[in-house]
Amino acid sequence: MSATTYVELRLPPSGVRRWHLDLAHALGRHDDLAVGVAWVDGPPAPARDLERLLAIESRIHRLPRAASSRVARHRLAHLGTRPPDSGRVLRLDLGGARVTSTRQWSLRFDGLAGEEAAAAALLAGRFPLVELVDPSGAVVASGRPGSERPGVTAAALDDVLAGCVRLVVAAVTGHSLRLPEGGTEAGGRSSPRSPAEQALRALATAPLRRAARAVLRTPHWRVGWRFVDGPGLIDSLQHPAEGWQDLPDDGHHFYADPFPIQVAGRTHLFVEDFDHRVGRGVVSVVEFDEQGPVGTPVCVLEHDVHLSYPFVLEHDGEVWMIPETSAAGTVELYRAADFPHHWVRHSVLLRDLDANDVTPFRHQGRWWLSATVRRGGSCSDALHLWHANDLRGPWTAHRGNPVVLDIASARPAGRVVEREGRLVRPAQDGTGGYGSALTLAEVVRLDPTAFEQRVVGRVTAGPGWAGTRLHTLNRAGRLEVIDGSSRSLRIPLPGRVRTLATSVPL
């Protein structure tokens, strides 16, 4: 946009929240934008029941109030209140004000204005469709920001509003986001809860949750595996009639993020290995023969921070791994010095970002990295891309980052595969909570300046895979693997595996 563009945030004086400050700061970091504020008539002040609910949940769950917290009007006093006499002016209505300009965009949650509309969607059991619309009603940008805690309104609202900052900034700076074609439709409860009902429910269930966590370790992920000839789950979208076999664990450890690889005719499965007693994950490996796993997973890589999602691949005659090191703010590349047990860090590919489930793949002679990046809000709804001529980099960020803002189809969930010339990427569908289902998205367009995908399938847990989660999908040769959640008893039960697959969420 022009260096003379003045962005006017149109706000009701009684409805200023922290996310409005965050938006002003994010826009102000762009040299070609000037940011101001206009105080306009809007909807009435938020109902006390909603504010009471947010306060109660924040206390019960020990949440720091963030994007949704009310702030005093003077916190925006540093912004101008009068547009310049010349240059472009873009007005952003964030509270339901009357349209006064052909250059006014309005933010809508399921077609309604105001954060209370976003909260109402969450209380109805769904994430709202967020749209920026112009005075004609045409959609300028759209997305479905989400949260890892959809059942806690205070946490989910904070995350959704943080996602709104990203959507608005992208649109204003010329990188308009669009919800993918074929994405998850809004669902929810048949009888939405009121803020008062949700507050009572939060107070009533808090002791039960504490008691359950005293007996159970949750979440406790588990890996399912099977041998298959021919098409797999990514093709059929159906769990096998014979079900999946579990990779056994001892109840103290859980295994997740399974990545199999065949090297020199042998198959090895790499997993996140999380020890509840330590509270941190490492990367472990177990070999598979024609009958199944040979022994139990053995640790092969540790770090100062939690490790997960051990993406392994062969390239240039070497075996490489990119584990998730988001807690360190890095994306790191490891090389197998002695496969599969000895790994050395080759380089740091990216720094100073919270990148989740980094997934490399090749497309039209170019290397790509995909990951969701957290910058406030959810770690699962904003898809970023980077490209390079070689796996070892240097890597260049896609010009449109984030290229997707969608809790149902952004976060990677396994290797990108090719099907009849089409790229299909497994993605996590977090509309029912973290890793609640698996989405398959076809990459329709991908180059350094554009990205487009459409959702072509969805797989959930169910009779073929007990529990409430389906999180990762991968295959190497005949070995196909998935993972999902269960619970582990804290009380020892000698002579049996102490994990329970269940469909009742905590």
Image (tube, rainbow, N blue to C red):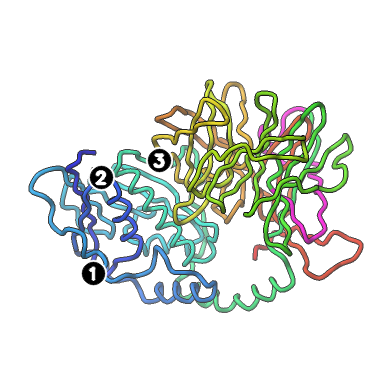
383 versus 15 height, above or below: above
Label 3 is placed on what type of residue? Answer: Arg
Query: Looking at the image, is mark 3 or mark 1 nearer the viewer?
Result: 1
Q: Residues within 10 Å of mark 2 (few under 14, many from 20)?
A: few
Tag 3 secondary structure:
loop
Tag 2 secondary structure:
loop
Residue occupied by mark 3: 178
Q: Are marks 3 and 1 in contact (CB under 8 Å)?
A: no
Residue occupied by mark 1: 74
Residue occupied by mark 2: 31
Could you say where residue 328 lies in the image, as x and y percent from the top left?
56, 52
Q: Is residue 332 magenta?
A: no
Label 1 is placed on what type of residue? Answer: His
Tag 1 secondary structure:
helix
What distance separates the C-alpha of mark 3 from that of mark 1? 34 Å
Residues 161 and 235: in front is 161
Main secondary structure type of the part rendered in magenta: loop
What residue range appears in magenta? Answer: 230-256
